[in-house]
Amino acid sequence: MSTTDVLRGPGEDALAAERRELTATWSGRGGFVGWMASVDHKSIAKRYIVTALAFFALGGAGALTMRLQLARPDNGLLGPDLYNQMFTMHGTTMMFLFAVPIMEAIGLYFVPLMVGTRNVAYPRLNALGYWTYLIGGLFLWGSFFAGSGPDTGWFSYAPLSETLFSPGKRVDIWAQTVTFTEIAALIAAVEIIVTVFKLRAPGMTLNRIPLFVWSMLVTAFMVLFAMSTVATASVMLALDRLVDTHFFRPATGGDALLWQHLFWFFGHPEVYIIFLPATGMVSTVLPAFTRRPVFGYTILVFALLITGFLSFALWVHHMLATGIPHHGSSFYTTASVMIALPSGIQVFCWIATIWTGRPVFRTPLLFVLGFLVLFVLGGLTGVMVAAIPFDLQVHDTYFVVAHFHYVLIGGAVFPLFAAIYYWYPKVTGRMLSERLGRWNFWLLFAGFNLTFFPMHILGLMGMPRRVYTYREALEWGDLNLLATAGALVLALGVALFVLNVVMSLGSGERAADNPWDADTLEWSTASPPPPYNFHPLPGVDGRSPAWSRPEELPRVTGLATGSREMLVTTALDARPDSCNEPPGPTIWPFVTALAVGVTFIGSVFTPWGFVVGMLLLLPPLVAWGWPRGKREETGTSPEAA
Amino acid sequence: MSDAGAEGLTIDAASLPRTMFGYRGLTWWATAGFMLIEGTTLAVLLVCYVYLRRSFTEWPPAPVPLPDLLVPSINLAVLLVTILPMAFARRAAHALDLRGVRLFLSIAVLLSVVAVVLRGFEFDALNVRWDQYAYGSVAWILVGMHATLLVVDLVESAVITTMMFRRDVEQKHYTDVEESALYQFFLSLTWVPVYAMVYLGPRVF
């Protein structure tokens, strides 16, 4: 399969020869070790996506088990201890191992393609991020299956999470999992920020950056501040438990509420860290299926930026029931209501896009429409719980559970499915089945509403979160049974999705380079993209480069084909500035991740784990960056010069 | 080169430089990213210090004595002085002056060794154990977090210095020197508020 020849080079034969050489230059080594050593952003992102989806399935299975337990009053399927572990594993998995990683993973795959470059800014660091995440996730689930699953909820409030109330290693395992995954998230954020600022195609000025890339950029900055905070907090919690510090212990001058402040200073932006990439996906999918550029590009960018800023000013609304001062509460209520504005603006822009476009009702658009309905519902209940009197009534009830599932599944998972149906052809070269896709959508949509809508009512009836069972006399049985039935429908929908993805991989219809006639750069290369992504490298002259006439687009020549070279451009105007030679494949990031694993898993059991781990980290880190002697370097030796 | 893209024609990358210092290169951005992350961490810990202070009537809580000032103040001076050789090493790197880089980088690394050793004694100067009250915990984590960064930086600077003493130094390694200098500036300067909070704070509030 050749590329679309959008960017026609000097002569076809010469171009084909250059592409062969580039393929050799940019391909990883073969074999298992070669696979482990890969630093290609596409390979790493694919692993990330598959791993995150596997954790999604595990977290979903946990949720389904809880629903079966709650299907009728006084049920005995799960005991209280296993139920506690289940909801903790479910929340922790969905937030730390699925939602954030999969959004960043899709960013790591598509940001370099959408800005028209060959890899992320730091390919080896990228590999380290993935391996660290994988080890962290396996550690959490390994511990669960070994009978030591965390059981203090996904936010592990102190003092419950302190050794006095939670002896054993369960909370330590939780705390270290958080530290692991946040390191991975921080690495991905740095990758995305620098790739966007420094590796954009010539001509891709700030006001031509695709909206998905904008959303990933804003998200990455939020990750820097939010994840640093929670990683610090989880280290403090681990220290309280391991070496008897007193950060969150009120009896010795610590403060349990400090944990809540730190956790929610991360936890609230976290919601938008998940949601903003989803809005980017919606803004990307819509133009292709409404046959027009998205309405209000500039407003949408500003909405992203405002949401990013405001999301750090809301965390206390998770703590309105803790007795914080009144004027403080009013401020956070106001901020919480205010953040509905940029979200509302985005919704109106998308509606305007559909209204004035010529909608083509394929599966991705169905998921976007489902998203609009569900997200608006979740947003409305969000405004409701921002009001303190109402919040105090429904705090810690199923109303809140309903609210955040509407926001997170409706607001992020539906756009994610839209994005997967949209980009699957680019990643695999195959189309997903449209028929299965429609079944997939309708089952998910119906199943979701059947599961979560009744929870609003259950919450208003007073059903608290995190109870493993309830008495028949409370009359919560019927609605719970309905919710469980809905969860089964939802699970069936997910199963169809898996079936579709797996079957289409082998027997799906072959995808053209640009099967949706979409407008962004990733569609101007082959499906799946070659190891070097583009040749020649494209320049852009507008927001919809793939809708321009090929011969009008600028193109970049003069990059080496026999060695890895990437074009570095200026941060604001994307003018060509220099060439960078990124490092090639290596096993050392994987070895480094193993040492990180020893550090964190070891320090669950003894403070020496940290010391030993740090010492183990040294050799791979030195080997990683050590120059491998003279090669065909473009840099000159100044001594010789 | 500058208005490439306007014409819709060909942009020739062959003549572009292959190594860039400062924000025009990629290394600078990675360092900036990690400074943001670590700066946030230190800022969060400083906020925790002030937050925990509110739960105490006395700070440090009796019978814990005030922290000593001598060793920490000497180390503050050492860290601030390290900025100088690093700044010279950076300037030498910009000029691709290998001898200058070797000289100043070596001095800076020696000073960093002194700082790390003194840091070890600084824990003594706190006059409190980490498991004595939240006061001890938060003082230890602030000094300890910065100490971890110091050790990591020392290892990194030592490796880069060793690299610069090899025979075949490439141009791109000079950007590593610059990055090392940048990170050293960050560590020296962030120590000022941490020092002030941990060692002077208990004397003030």
Image (cartoon, coloured by chain):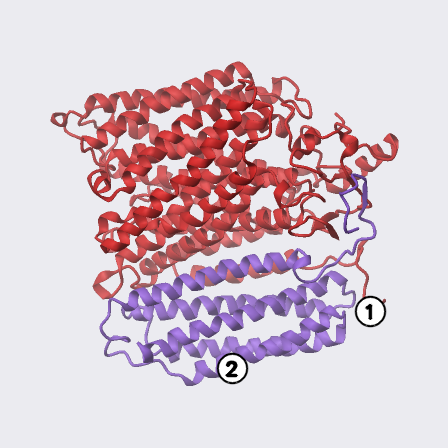
Chain colours: A red, B purple
- Which quadrant holds residue B120? bottom left
| Drawn side of residue B58 relative to residue A579, left or right | left
- Residue A248 at x, y = what percent? 28, 59
Q: CA distance from mark 1 to mark 2?
A: 35 Å
Would you place residue A393 above or below residue B16 in this image? above
Q: Nearer the viewer, residue A381 or A400?
A: A381
| Residue positioned 48% across, 21% down in the render | A366
Instruction: Name the amino acid type tagged 2.
Output: Ala
Q: Farthest residue in the top direction?
A: A435
Q: Chain of mark 2?
A: B
- Residue A93 at x, y = what percent? 40, 39
Task: Tell me the residue that label 1 is attached to.
Answer: A639
Would you place residue A369 above or below residue A108 in this image? above
- Residue A492 at x, y = what percent? 41, 20
Task: Tell me the residue that label 2 is attached to.
Answer: B77
Q: Quadrant of the C terminus of chain B?
A: bottom left
